[in-house]
Image: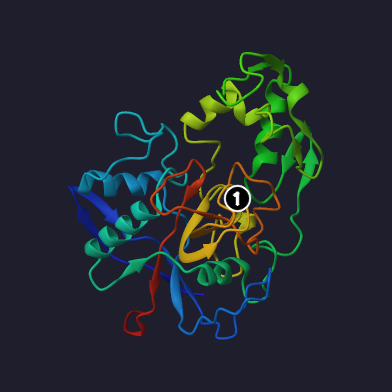
Amino acid sequence: MKTISLSFLCAANMALAAPDMLHIPAAPEFSFAADGESSPIEQEYFIGKYPVTNEEYSQFCADTGHRVPRYWKNGKYPSGKGKHPVLWVSFDDAEAYCEWLTEKNPGKSYRLPTEAEWEHAASGPQQTRYPWGNDAEISFKNGLIVSNFNFNGVIASILLKKNPTQKVTFVSPRSERKGESVALNSLLILNERGCVKGWQDHKNGGGFVQTDVFQKLNEEGGYTTPVDAYPKGVSAYGCFDMSGNAWEWTSSKIIATNGAERGQTVQAIRGGSWYATSRSCSVIFRGEGRRAEAAFNTVGFRVAADSDKKRI
């Protein structure tokens, strides 16, 4: 494993540090672990050690005038969230960021990883279910979910621990219970494996995500964590935050097999998010995708680059 340190350059009177990039070996016989589909990775490549953060993305927006994510206020990301993954960025936004990063770092060509490259970097040569191994390693201690990654079970446990009887009100126009208030602990039920009941209700709109508490959380950029908050969740190649926290765009198109996009041709996203279940946060989980032109409250990205042997 090789970490590449690149020089500091100037962008709009700000010091722009090139991202930490990790060397990933080729995998000519690579197949997706979930379904065995062959997708050879013929060349070695680099991938970001971390997802792109709010702080990094703000440099891009300041330098180019690109629109900022919708949860930022007055052009600035939420206080204290500089090291959190940027969200509400479309595939097109992510590609624009890669183009800008390439311009600012002569000699390197940044891009989004393919779906196969992403999984290979996340699951390692053994193709484990999670970056650290095949066990999710989720436990329940002192009323809180303890894990190597950020997912909805972690968030539910924090909210229930902090104020289990707080009133939440259904506010979604699609909710049949709009205007009704209930105690949080009567809506969210959590088990010791981090499985959450009451988080979402697609049928009647009576889940936690249809409440005012979730709405406020969403407006602040979700319940993300710093990209280096889970050092035990690092992959075999040294990548942080590839399970949970934020889904990540890839450059690969798929026909989605999950969610509202099921049956549509979309850009593959991988890794799960703060909103997702622990199962969806497995790094071999496939089938999730989003429309390239749209932005979402759970989707960010990390950059990749082709190998240049002269610079290694």
The quadrant of the picture occupied by the C terminus is bottom left
Image check: 24 left or right of 53?
Answer: right
The residue under the point 65% across, 28% down is 205
The amino acid sitting under disc 1 is: Gly
SS at badge 1: loop
Res 79 quadrant in image: top left
The residue nearer to you, when weighing 201 against 82, is: 201
Query: Is 234 on the left or on the right of 300, as rendered?
Result: right
- Residue 262 or 218: which is nearer the viewer? 262
Model colouring: rainbow
Percent x, y of residue 43: 45, 83
Give the tally of numbered discs: 1
Residue under pointer 1: 244
* Residue visible at 72% across and 27% down in the picture: 161
Question: In the image, is 189 to the left or to the right of 173?
Answer: right
Q: Is residue 266 left or right of residue 194?
A: left
Foreground residue among 35 and 224 = 35
Q: Which residue in the rendered view is the most extreme toward the right?
A: 192
> In the image, is residue 40 above or below residue 60?
below
Residue 181 x %, y %: 67, 14
Q: Residues within 10 Å of mark 1 (few under 14, many from 20)?
A: many
